[in-house]
Image: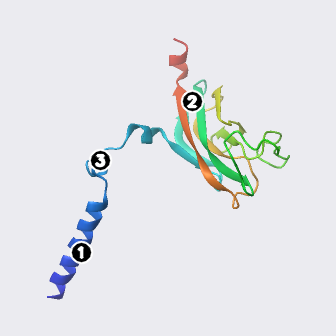
Amino acid sequence: MKKSIILVLLASIAAIGWISVPRAEKAGQIRQDALNRIRIYAYRDWQGTGVSVYEGDLVSIRAQGTWLYTPDEYHGPEGHRRYSAPQFYPVPGIPGGALIGRIGTDGQPSYVGRGTRWRATENGQIYLRIDDDILSDNEGFVEIQITVVPADEDSQ
């Protein structure tokens, strides 16, 4: 008797869970624009994008959204308009709180902002983060899109 009650409860919980799943997800469908979105959070250190490049590839990154870098002042991936990144930040001299990126875990970081285009100088995954030294007091995220044109296709 106890087993049948437990089984009925488990079946009920599973049915309620299934009902709450949107119909498109039940069918295994994901919106195309959701596949391209990568979120980079202001309160996390270097975040892998899952996009790998090879030396010579042409890389384009576009970013939009807002995050909190200084108290009560949200801004976009271009960085804070009044505060410059000090010498001890990953990329000094650019607007503080800007989106920065690098190739690989040891690559040289550089400014990305709202968007950039560059040729990969090494092989590896693209990593991104906010240009800040203390991440724990930040909030928000930016969404990015990365386009890579392989070196051999770019020359055609």
Residue at numbered disc 2: 54
Label 2: how many Cα within 10 Å (few below 14, some 14–19, many 20+): some
Label 1: how many Cα within 10 Å (few below 14, some 14–19, many 20+): few
In the rendered structure, which amino acid carries the disc numbered 3?
A: Ala
Residue at numbered disc 3: 24
| Up/down of 23 relative to 32, above or below | below
In the rendered structure, which amino acid carries the disc numbered 1?
A: Leu
Dividing the picture into quadrants, the one containing residue 91 is top right
What residue is shown at x 83% (from left), y 40% (from top)? Answer: 93
Judged by depth in the image, the label closer to the viewer, 2 or 1, is: 1
Whether tag 3 and tag 2 are in contact, CB under 8 A, the answer is no
What residue is shown at x 62% (from left), y 41% (from top)? Answer: 104
Q: Is residue 25 left or right of residue 5?
A: right
Q: Which mark is on residue 10?
A: 1
Label 3: how many Cα within 10 Å (few below 14, some 14–19, many 20+): few
Instruction: Give the number of marks.
Output: 3
| Up/down of 77 relative to 121, above or below | below
Q: Secondary structure at mark 3?
A: helix
What residue is shown at x 59% (from left), y 24% (from top)? Answer: 58
Judged by depth in the image, the label closer to the viewer, 3 or 2, is: 3
Q: Is residue 19 left or right of residue 61?
A: left
Q: Which mark is on residue 57?
A: none
Whether tag 3 and tag 1 are in contact, CB under 8 A, the answer is no
Q: Which residue extends farthest front?
A: 72
